[in-house]
């Protein structure tokens, strides 16, 4: 199968932001992401699908979704050869047409101000560090039936809170948008590490460290802890964007996390080098 980088609506245009979506076969969830992105308050962006080897059926479905969507969509595909998320993210970066990159996962549904919020605090030399609200199985089922996934929290906040008080879902408070800067500063308390499903920065800052290290080939440390560590070494400030740029994470059973990457990350920490020789430039 040849590399798929031809599924796009407006490739030559320059955008305020490129939304890079890590994806593998889950077209049902991606349809919800597309629906939410179509309802963003900020419209000047492209979508780049970082596809880690989805099968032919998923590719056909994605083709059909792309054709009917109002979004500017670019599909970057690589052959399925195990978990190679960092490699497909690097390919998506190279395919993007914006100077500003926003990273999300294909099962995280951005709410309506998501892109606006990221761009509102975008700065050179700064990486914005967002979070997600983890929905319960019940709330996920409700979201799947929603006519407007981008407004799910706004339309269901009391149901979410009630469900949370019954012991369901996680980090629900991260799904509530607060725009008052002083209040946000008080409740953020401290800057936690990056999560791969919600962060953004200028492309030039990510390229200072040669982007993602492609030696990480298992879920776990890789697209978050490693990139966080090396960005800080390069002098990039990690700035929390908690309670803005909100998104919800669809429920699924907890996937096994491998510790195979731990030795590599420890080696990188000991070396103390921001630049990786195993990123975009080989």
Image (tube, rainbow, N blue to C red):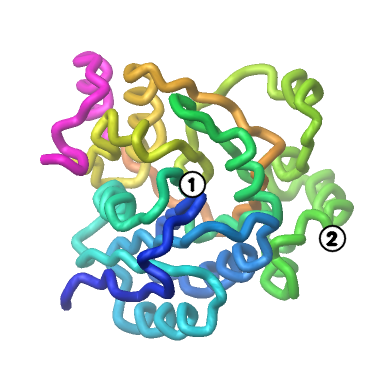
Describe residue 269's horizontal placement relative to residue 203 as left or right.
Answer: left
| Neighbour tally class for label 1: few under 14, some 14-19, many 20 plus, Cα within 10 Å | many
x, y (%) of residue 169? 70, 49
Q: Is residue 71 above or below residue 265?
A: below
Mark earlier in primary sequence (1, 2): 1
Q: Verify whether residue 279 appears in magenta.
A: yes
Helix, strand or loop under label 1: strand
Distance between mark 1 and mark 2 Cα atoms: 25 Å
Q: Verify whether residue 220 appears in magenta.
A: no
First to last magenta residue range: 261-282
According to the image, label 2 marks what residue?
Answer: 155
Helix, strand or loop under label 2: helix
Describe residue 93's horizontal placement relative to residue 65 as left or right.
Answer: left
For the C terminus, give its image quadrant: top left
Describe residue 75's horizontal placement relative to residue 190 as left or right.
Answer: left
Q: Is residue 250 visible?
A: no
Q: Is residue 271 visible?
A: yes
Q: Foreground residue, 17 or 282?
A: 17
**Which mark is on residue 102?**
1
x, y (%) of residue 251? 60, 58
Q: Kindly identify the residue that appears in the image at 16 percent across and 78 percent down.
A: 1
């Amino acid at each position: 199968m040849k590399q798929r980088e031809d599924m796009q609506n407006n490739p030559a245009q320059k955008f305020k932001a490129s939304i890079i979506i890590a994806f593998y076969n889950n077209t049902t969830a991606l349809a919800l992401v597309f629906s939410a992105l179509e309802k963003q308050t900020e419209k000047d962006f492209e979508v780049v699908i970082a596809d880690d080897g989805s099968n032919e059926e998923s590719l056909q479905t994605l083709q059909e979704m792309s054709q009917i969507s109002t979004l500017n969509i670019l599909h970057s595909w690589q052959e399925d050869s195990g978990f190679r998320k960092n490699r497909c993210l690097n390919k998506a970066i190279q395919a993007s047409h914006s100077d500003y990159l926003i990273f999300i996962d294909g099962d995280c549904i951005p709410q309506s101000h998501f892109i606006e919020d990221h761009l509102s605090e975008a700065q050179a030399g700064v990486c914005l560090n967002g979070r997600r609200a983890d929905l319960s199985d019940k709330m996920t089922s409700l979201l799947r039936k929603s006519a407007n996934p981008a407004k799910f929290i706004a339309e269901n906040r009391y149901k979410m809170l009630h469900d949370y008080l019954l012991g369901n879902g996680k980090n629900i408070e991260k799904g509530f948008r607060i725009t008052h800067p002083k209040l946000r500063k008080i409740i953020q308390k401290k800057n936690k590490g990056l999560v791969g499903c919600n962060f953004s920065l200028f492309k030039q800052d990510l390229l200072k460290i040669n982007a993602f290290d492609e030696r990480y080939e298992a879920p776990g440390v890789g697209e978050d802890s490693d990139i966080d560590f090396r960005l800080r070494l390069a002098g990039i400030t990690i700035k929390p964007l908690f309670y803005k740029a909100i998104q919800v994470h669809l429920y699924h059973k907890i996937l096994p996390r491998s510790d195979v990457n731990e030795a590599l990350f420890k080696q990188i920490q000991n070396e103390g080098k921001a630049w990786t020789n195993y990123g975009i430039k080989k």
